[in-house]
C-alpha cells in the first residue's frame, strides 16, 4: 500500500473509530480493532482470519475447559485440558504436551488467572475457569511460574510461522498488582517468539472479590489477547 493510501486509511480510523471497530473495509484489508467489546468466540474467529499466513489446518486450545471458545465454530480444534472432568479431546498438561513437534498452526492459551480464590459460592468460577487452583508463597501466590514451561511447549508444537493467542488478565492479589501480561510476554520472548500484537478485550463487569470493602486499584474492566508468532518477524 502506498504512503498516501495508508495515511488516508489512518485518517479514516481516527475520524470514524466505529467503522474501524466494525471491520469495515477502509483500505485493501479488513481491519481488526485493538479494543474489542464483544465476546471471545467472534474475536477469535476474526483473529484466526487475520493473523495466520494461511488458513490454519490444525488448532490447539491448550486450556480448553468446556470449549466455550468453539461452540459455534467449525474450526479444526483439538482441545487439551489437565482436568478430565471437562472431557477435553486430550487430557494432558500444557507444560508437557503430548504432541510431536510442529503439530499445530495455531495455539490458543487461556490459563487460570486468579489463584487461591474460591470463597464465592454463588458463582461456579472454580470449575468454569480453573480458578480453584492454588499457588504457593514460593510462587508469589500467582501463576507466573507456569508461563515459561508452557511457552517452551507452545513453541515446540507450533509450525514455523505459527501463531499463539494468549488471553491474559492482570489482577490484584496479595496486596499487589500482578502484571500477568508482562510476564507472559517475557516468557514468550525468552523461548524465541516474536511478540506481535495486543488486543484489549473489555469485560462486561469487573472482577470483584467479595472480601474487598475498599479498593485502591482501578477495577479491572479488561483483559488482553496477546499475539505471538514463531518467527523473526510479525508481518
Ligand atoms: C480459564 S479456563 C479456560 C476457559 C476456556 N477458555 C473457556 O472459555 O471455556 C483454564 C483451564 O485451564 C485448565 N488448566 C489448568 N492448568 C492446566 C495445565 N497445566 N494444562 C492444561 N490445562 C490446564 C483448567 O483445568 C481450566 O479448565
Image (cartoon, grey):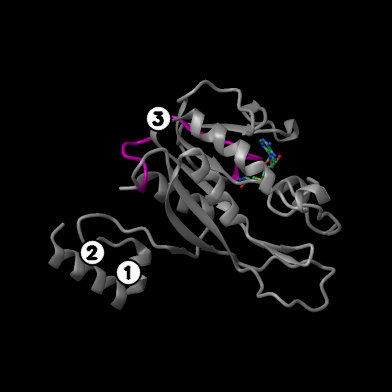
Q: Which residues are magenta?
A: 50-68
Q: Position of residue 226 (x, y in %)?
A: 49, 52
Relative to 58, is 26 on the left or the right? left
Q: Which residue is mark 2?
A: 26
Q: Which residue is mark 3?
A: 57
Between residues 127 and 105, which one lies in front from this camera angle? 105
Between residues 183 and 159, which one lies in front from this camera angle? 183
Does the Cβ of the disc 1 residue fall within 8 Å of ligand 1? no
Q: Quadrant of ligand 1?
A: top right
Crowding at mark 3 (Cα within 10 Å: few <14, some 14-19, many 20+): few
Residue that appears at 81% across and 53% down: 116
Q: Which residue is mark 1?
A: 19
SS class, disc 2 = loop
Mark 3 and mark 2 in contact? Answer it, CB < 8 Å. no
Sequence-wise first label, 3 or 1: 1
- Taking the magenta stretch, the answer to whether it contains residue 126 is no
Residue that appears at 73% across and 52% down: 142
Sequence-wise first label, 2 or 1: 1
Q: How much space separates mark 3 and mark 1, taking CA atoms? A: 31 Å
Q: Position of residue 39 (x, y in %)?
A: 53, 57
Q: Position of residue 52 (x, y in %)?
A: 36, 41
Q: Is residue 135 visible?
A: no
Does the Cβ of the disc 3 residue fall within 8 Å of ligand 1? no
Mark 2 and mark 1 in contact? Answer it, CB < 8 Å. yes
Between residues 115 and 118, which one lies in front from this camera angle? 115
Give the quadrant of residue 99.
Answer: top right
Examine the rendered structure and indicate whether residue 12 appears above or below residue 109. below
Residue that appears at 22% across and 67% down: 9
Q: Main secondary structure of the magenta part?
A: loop
Crowding at mark 2 (Cα within 10 Å: few <14, some 14-19, many 20+): some
SS class, disc 3 = loop
Crowding at mark 1 (Cα within 10 Å: few <14, some 14-19, many 20+): some
Amino acid at each position: 500500500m502506498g504512503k498516501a493510501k495508508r495515511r488516508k486509511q489512518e485518517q479514516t480510523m481516527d475520524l470514524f473509530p466505529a467503522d474501524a471497530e466494525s471491520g469495515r473495509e477502509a483500505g485493501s484489508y479488513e481491519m481488526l480493532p485493538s479494543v474489542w467489546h464483544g465476546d471471545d468466540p467472534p474475536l477469535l474467529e476474526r483473529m484466526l482470519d487475520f493473523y495466520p499466513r494461511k488458513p490454519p489446518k490444525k488448532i490447539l486450545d491448550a486450556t480448553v475447559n468446556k470449549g466455550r471458545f468453539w461452540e459455534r465454530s467449525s474450526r479444526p480444534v483439538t482441545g487439551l485440558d489437565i482436568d478430565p472432568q471437562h472431557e477435553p479431546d486430550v487430557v494432558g498438561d500444557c507444560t508437557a504436551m503430548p504432541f510431536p513437534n510442529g503439530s499445530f498452526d495455531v495455539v490458543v492459551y487461556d490459563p487460570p488467572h486468579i489463584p487461591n480464590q474460591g470463597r464465592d459460592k454463588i458463582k461456579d468460577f472454580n470449575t468454569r475457569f480453573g480458578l480453584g487452583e492454588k499457588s504457593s508463597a514460593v510462587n508469589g501466590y500467582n501463576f507466573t511460574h507456569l508461563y515459561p514451561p508452557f511457552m517452551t511447549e507452545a513453541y515446540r508444537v507450533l509450525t514455523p510461522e505459527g501463531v499463539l493467542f494468549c488471553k491474559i488478565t492482570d489482577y490484584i492479589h496479595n496486596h499487589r498488582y500482578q502484571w500477568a501480561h508482562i510476564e507472559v510476554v517475557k516468557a514468550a520472548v525468552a523461548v524465541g517468539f516474536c511478540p506481535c500484537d495486543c488486543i484489549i478485550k473489555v469485560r462486561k463487569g469487573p472482577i470483584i472479590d467479595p472480601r474487598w470493602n475498599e479498593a485502591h486499584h482501578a477495577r479491572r474492566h479488561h483483559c488482553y489477547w496477546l499475539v505471538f508468532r514463531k518467527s523473526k518477524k510479525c508481518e
